[in-house]
C-alpha cells in the first residue's frame, strides 16, 4: 500500500474504531480516529490522511453528510472514502455512493475486507 500511509477511521463505536485501527496498524498504516463527522473534519484537516473509512450512522454529523462535505471541498474532493454500514440493501449502498463514497463496506468488517478496500483505494489514488 505504497500510496496509503495514513487513514482516518470515523465511527461512533469505540469498538469499531479500535478494531479498524488494529487491522490498519498491522499493515504499518498510521491511523487517525474520530467519533463523529465534526471531529472528523478537524482530524482530516489537521492530519491530511490518504484515505477515510466513514461510518454512515453517527450522531451530530453523519457519514453521508460528511462525505458530501468532503466531496464539495477543493482540498479533499479526491480523498478515497469507504463507507461503513451494518446495512447492505441496494438502496443504502446507492445512498452511500451518491453521497461521495468510492467503496461501501458492510460491518462487521474483517482484515480481508480492509485489505481489499486498501487495494481499491490505491487504484483510486493511482487514477488521479
Image (cartoon, grey):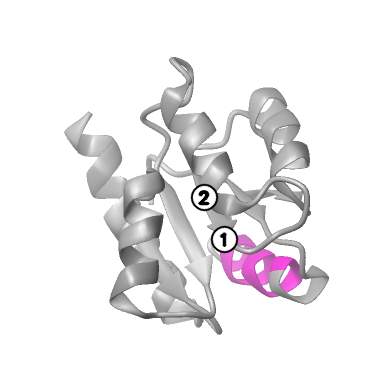
The structure residue drawn at horizontal position 72% and vertical position 66%, both measured from the top left corner, is 17
Q: Nearer the viewer, residue 101 or 119?
A: 101
The residue carrying mark 1 is: 56
Residue at 64% across, 54% down:
9
Task: In the displayed orientation, state which residue is furthest to the front.
Answer: 91
Residue range of the region highlighted in magenta in the rendering? 17-26
47 left or right, relative to 109: right
Report the predominant secondary structure element of the magenta stretch: helix
At which x and y percent is residue 48? 59, 28
Left or right? Give the position of 76 relative to 62: left
Say if mark 2 contacts mark 1, CB within 8 Å: yes
- Using the numbered discs, state the Cα–Cα distance from disc 2 to disc 1 in whole angstroms: 6 Å
Q: Is residue 115 above or below residue 34?
A: below
Q: Residue furthest left?
A: 127
The image position of residue 36, as x and y in percent, is 74, 50
Residue behind mark 2: 64
- In the visual, does 40 lie left or right of 92? right
Q: Is residue 12 visible?
A: yes
Whether residue 116 is visible here, answered yes or no, is: no
Q: Position of residue 116 (x, y in %)?
A: 33, 69
The quarter of the rendered structure image containing the C terminus is top left
Image quadrant in which you'd find residue 39: top right
Q: Is residue 51 magenta?
A: no
Amino acid at each position: 500500500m505504497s500510496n496509503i500511509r495514513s487513514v482516518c477511521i470515523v465511527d461512533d463505536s469505540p469498538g469499531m474504531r479500535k478494531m479498524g485501527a488494529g487491522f490498519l496498524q498491522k499493515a504499518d498504516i498510521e491511523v487517525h480516529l474520530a467519533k463523529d463527522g465534526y471531529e472528523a473534519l478537524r482530524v482530516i484537516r489537521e492530519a491530511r490522511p490518504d484515505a477515510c473509512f466513514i461510518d454512515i450512522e453517527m450522531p451530530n454529523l453523519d457519514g453521508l453528510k460528511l462525505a458530501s462535505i468532503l466531496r464539495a471541498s477543493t482540498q479533499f474532493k479526491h480523498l478515497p472514502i469507504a463507507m461503513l454500514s451494518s446495512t447492505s440493501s441496494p438502496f443504502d449502498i446507492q445512498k452511500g455512493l451518491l453521497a461521495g463514497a468510492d467503496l461501501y463496506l458492510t460491518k462487521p468488517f474483517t482484515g480481508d475486507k480492509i485489505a481489499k478496500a486498501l487495494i481499491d483505494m490505491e487504484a483510486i489514488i493511482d487514477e488521479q
